[in-house]
Image (spheres, rainbow, N blue to C red):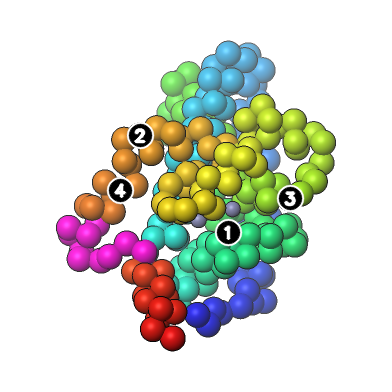
C-alpha cells in the first residue's frame, strides 16, 4: 500500500495548533486557579472524570482510524488513518517521532475540549459549571498527552518516572497496550490509560458501533485490511 508521507504543510499546521492549544490551556488554568485551590476534592474528581473521557474519546478515534477508510482519503487519510495503519506495520517508528509529530494530531483533537471548557466557564457561573469546565480541561490535557503516552508504551526504556506512571496505570501501561497489537487486533483501542478497554470489550462497544455503521451506510469494517490480505494470498 502506497502511503502519503508526513509533509511540511501538515507539520506547520500541527506546530501552530500546539502553540494555540498550550496558550488556551494556560489561560483556562489561570481562570480556574481560584476554584481549583478552594475545591481540591472536586478538582480530583473532575480530573479522574476527564481521564476516563479522554481514554474513551481516544479509543473511539483510534478505532475509527483502524476500521474505516484508507490513508488516501482527503484530510483525515493523511492526518489520522495513515499514522494508525503505519503504526501497525512498524510499531517502533513512533518512538523516533519528535514532539510535533507525536503530539500535533492530538492537539487538534484536544482543542474542542478546551473551547468547550472556556464556553462553560464564561456562560455559567456555578460550582457545577466549574466542575464540568475542569472535567473538559482534564480531557483536553490527557487527550493531548495520549500519543506521548502511546509512544512511551512502545519505548524499550522510557524514563524511570514514566515507568512509575505506567506501572501505576495513570498512563497507558506497556503490557496492556500489547493486547491491541496482538491478534485479532480488534479491541483495546483506548490509549490514554486503557481504563475503558475492559468494559468496552465486555459490552462489545466497538462491534455494536460497527454493526450500526454497516447497517446504516453499508460500509464494511477493516475492508482495506481484508483487501490487502486477499491480494497477498493471490500474489
Ligand atoms: Zn490500532
Ligand atoms: Zn501502539
Q: Which residue is mark 2?
A: 202
Q: Residues within 10 Å of mark 1 (few under 14, many from 20)?
A: many
How many numbered circles does the render carry?
A: 4
In space, the residues marked 3 and 1 are separated at their CA atoms by: 20 Å
Q: Which mark identifies residue 18?
A: none
The extreme bottom residue here reads 235
Name the residue rendered at 70%, 47% in the picture. Answer: 152
Whether residue 65 is situated above or below residue 176 in the rendered picture: below
**Mark positioned earlier in the residue sequence (3 or 1):** 1
In space, the residues marked 2 and 1 are separated at their CA atoms by: 29 Å
Residue 225: image x %, image y %? 41, 69
Name the residue rendered at 27%, 65% in the picture. Answer: 220
Q: Which residue is mark 3?
A: 155
The magenta stretch spans which residues?
213-222
Lateral position of residue 118 relative to residue 156, left or right: left
Helix, strand or loop status at disc 4:
helix
The extreme left residue here reads 215
Mark 4 or 1, closer to the camera: 4
Is 120 a magenta residue? no
Q: Which residue is mark 1?
A: 105
Is residue 21 visible in the rendered structure shown here? no
**Mark positioned earlier in the residue sequence (2 or 1):** 1
Amino acid at each position: 500500500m502506497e502511503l502519503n508521507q508526513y509533509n511540511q504543510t501538515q507539520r506547520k499546521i500541527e506546530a501552530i495548533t500546539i502553540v494555540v492549544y498550550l496558550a488556551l490551556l494556560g489561560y483556562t488554568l489561570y481562570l480556574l486557579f481560584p476554584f481549583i485551590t478552594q475545591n481540591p476534592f472536586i478538582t480530583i474528581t473532575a480530573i479522574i472524570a476527564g481521564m476516563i473521557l479522554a481514554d474513551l474519546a481516544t479509543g473511539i478515534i483510534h478505532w475509527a482510524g483502524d476500521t474505516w477508510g484508507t490513508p488516501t482519503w482527503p484530510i483525515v487519510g493523511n492526518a489520522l488513518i495513515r499514522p494508525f495503519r503505519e503504526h501497525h506495520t512498524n510499531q517502533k517508528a513512533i518512538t523516533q517521532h519528535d514532539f510535533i509529530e507525536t503530539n500535533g494530531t492530538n492537539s487538534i483533537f484536544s482543542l474542542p475540549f478546551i473551547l468547550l471548557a472556556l464556553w462553560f466557564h464564561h456562560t455559567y457561573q456555578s460550582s457545577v459549571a466549574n466542575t464540568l469546565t475542569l472535567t473538559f480541561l482534564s480531557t483536553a490535557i490527557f487527550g493531548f498527552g495520549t500519543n506521548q503516552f502511546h509512544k512511551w508504551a512502545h519505548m524499550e526504556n522510557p524514563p524511570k518516572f514514566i515507568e512509575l506512571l505506567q506501572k501505576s496505570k495513570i498512563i497507558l501501561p506497556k503490557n496492556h497496550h500489547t493486547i491491541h497489537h496482538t491478534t485479532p487486533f480488534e479491541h483495546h483501542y483506548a490509549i490514554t490509560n486503557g481504563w475503558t478497554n475492559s468494559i468496552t470489550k465486555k459490552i462489545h462497544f466497538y462491534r455494536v458501533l460497527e454493526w450500526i455503521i454497516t447497517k446504516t451506510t453499508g460500509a464494511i469494517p477493516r475492508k482495506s485490511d481484508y483487501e490487502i490480505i486477499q491480494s497477498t494470498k493471490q500474489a
